[in-house]
């Protein structure tokens, strides 16, 4: 029988295994994960888990029994440390080797580290269930939290921590929040965060993180200010987990490059999820896009390619992501960028909730949008961009 080895026991790896079985794959399936946990979901970590709304077990994506029923052999708590493409062997941290016919790389990414002096207390990142458990346990009313980075993670942690009575300062090198969405969205977000009591220190970098008296971290900023935190959370981006692929020619600093079918330059090896860089729409380069629905969609493509080969058309990949902050749902669809022209809905300044910002190309056609509490409009744009109905004009969405 054939053998597929999937390295990375989280969303992308699990979904690939499930999709392979759903498509009738009958070979041996092994899922290797460095974490000791069964595959779990990360989006709730900065939301429901930090808010204390969900017990940890609610984040699990699957039970051991369901994996057994799918005939997936899971090896948890052991990392892959090397790959020999010539002999088609994966080496694991315990010294064992696994042979494959197809290999799936789904090792995700990890938080970018901030240089900090040894011994600075309570400096955390938020990527794993274990991280979330540590941070959640330290969120108590009146405690001071300094967040470094104003992307998805920084903004969500601020929202969750404030709800638990924590005194939050959000520091970012950029003068705006979630810079990729442009100034209008940032203005809206700033008002939300400030309205909830978050102190924003924007356009300023961290000079150093040290230890003040006791267990308190002191964060020196480039403008000379010094902040004190009982807790620091750093969210300044992520880097792909590719070290185990050293010497294989499969990975670079931007992750593992793949074709539209998720195939690497080695026809027996596929990659998906946060570790992988897929071709950009329009054929201009490769991009790692670290969002939940991308891993899920890519798993369908990779599983199909393993079962059927790569002659099918995987269709257009329309980006989709979301964020929850202060009880509001943000959804982004398609290509959004601060560099594109932005048109906000007529009610942008007045509506309490439902509103959106569209992103237009140089012809005035919609490439994507950011939607606030407007799931219907978000769904409409997603279908329009996925379909063959032709270009999407801004007035078709009521902007
Ligand atoms: P990962 O989830 O990173 O999983 C990779 C797994 O591989 C990990 O378990 C890792 O330990 C393991 N691994 C790494 N190296 C090895 C090795 N050498 N051998 C074996 N195993 C290895 N996306 C959204 O769209 N919306 C959201 O609201 C959202 N919220 C998020 C909140 C948080 C706090 C985080 C961290 C992410 C969030 N995301 C969100 C992003 C989303 O969770 C990721 O895109 C998704 O987890 C990617 O799945 P993945 O399986 O590719 O990678």
Image (cartoon, helix red, strand yellow):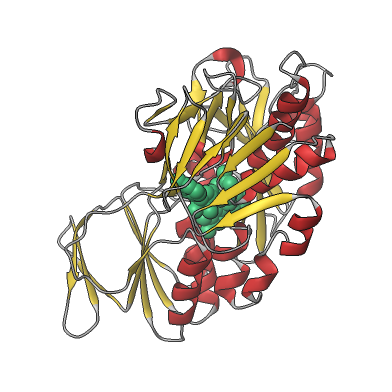
What residue is at 76 percent from the left and 57 percent from the top? 68
Residue 150 image offset from top left, x and y in percent: 42, 53
Q: Nearer the viewer, residue 370 or 343?
A: 370
Q: Tell me the quarter of the picture where residue 380 sits.
A: top right
Nearer to the camera, 133 or 103: 103
* Image position of 337 (left or right of 27): left
Where is residue 308 drawn, in percent x and y? 78, 21
Residue found 64% across the figure and 20% down from its top = 260
Closer-to-camera residue (229/21): 21
Q: Position of residue 250 (x, y in %)?
A: 44, 25
Count of all numbered marks drawn on residues in the image: 0
At a point 71% along the width and 63% down the height, the residue shown is 64
Q: Is residue 306 above or below residue 6?
A: above
Figure check: 392 above or below 343: above
Q: Can residue 107 be seen by looking at this rendering?
A: yes
Residue 167 x, y percent position in the rendering: 41, 78
The answer to whether residue 349 shows anywhere in this view is: no
Relative to 380, is 206 on the left or the right? left
Viewport quadrant of the C terminus: top right
Q: Quadrant of the N terminus?
A: top right
Q: Quadrant of residue 43?
A: bottom right
Residue 250 vertical placement versus 217 (above, below): above
Q: Is residue 395 above or below residue 221?
A: above
Q: Is residue 171 left or right of residue 326?
A: left
């Amino acid at each position: 029988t054939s053998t597929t080895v999937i390295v990375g026991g989280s969303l992308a790896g699990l979904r690939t295994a499930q999709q392979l079985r759903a498509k009738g794959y009958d070979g041996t399936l092994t899922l290797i994960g460095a974490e000791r946990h069964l595959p779990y979901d990360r989006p709730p970590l900065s939301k429901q888990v930090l808010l204390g709304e969900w017990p940890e077990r609610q984040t699990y994506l699957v039970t051991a029994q369901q994996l057994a029923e799918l005939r997936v052999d899971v090896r948890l708590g052991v990392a892959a440390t090397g790959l020999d493409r010539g002999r088609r062997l994966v080496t694991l941290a315990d010294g064992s080797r696994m042979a494959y016919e197809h290999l799936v790389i789904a090792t995700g990414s990890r938080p970018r580290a901030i240089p900090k002096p040894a011994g600075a207390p309570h400096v955390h990142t938020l990527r794993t269930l274990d991280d979330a458990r540590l941070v959640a346990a330290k969120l108590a009313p009146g405690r001071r939290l300094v967040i470094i980075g104003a992307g998805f993670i920084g903004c969500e942690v601020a929202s969750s921590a404030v709800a638990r009575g924590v005194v939050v300062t959000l520091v970012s090198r950029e003068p705006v929040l979630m810079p990729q969405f442009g100034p209008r969205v940032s203005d809206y977000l700033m008002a939300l965060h400030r309205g909830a009591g978050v102190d924003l220190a924007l356009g300023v970098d961290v000079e150093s993180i040290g230890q003040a008296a006791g267990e308190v971290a002191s964060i020196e900023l480039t403008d000379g200010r010094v902040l004190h935190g009982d807790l620091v959370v750093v969210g300044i981006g992520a880097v792909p987990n590719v070290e185990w692929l050293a010497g294989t020619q499969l990975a670079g600093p931007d992750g593992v490059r793949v074709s539209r079918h998720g195939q690497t330059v080695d026809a027996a090896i596929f990659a998906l999820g946060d570790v992988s860089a897929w071709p950009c729409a329009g054929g201009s380069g490769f991009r790692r896009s670290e969002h939940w629905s991308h891993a899920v969609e890519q798993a369908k493509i990779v599983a199909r390619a393993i079962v059927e080969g790569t002659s099918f058309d995987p269709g257009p990949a329309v980006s989709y992501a979301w964020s929850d902050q202060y009880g509001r749902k943000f959804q982004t669809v398609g290509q959004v960028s601060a560099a594109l022209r932005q048109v906000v809905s007529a009610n942008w300044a007045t509506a309490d909730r439902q509103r959106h910002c569209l992103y237009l190309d140089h012809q005035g056609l919609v490439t994507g949008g950011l939607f606030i509490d407007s799931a219907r409009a978000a769904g409409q744009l997603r279908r329009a961009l996925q379909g063959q109905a032709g270009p999407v004009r801004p007035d078709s969405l009521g902007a």
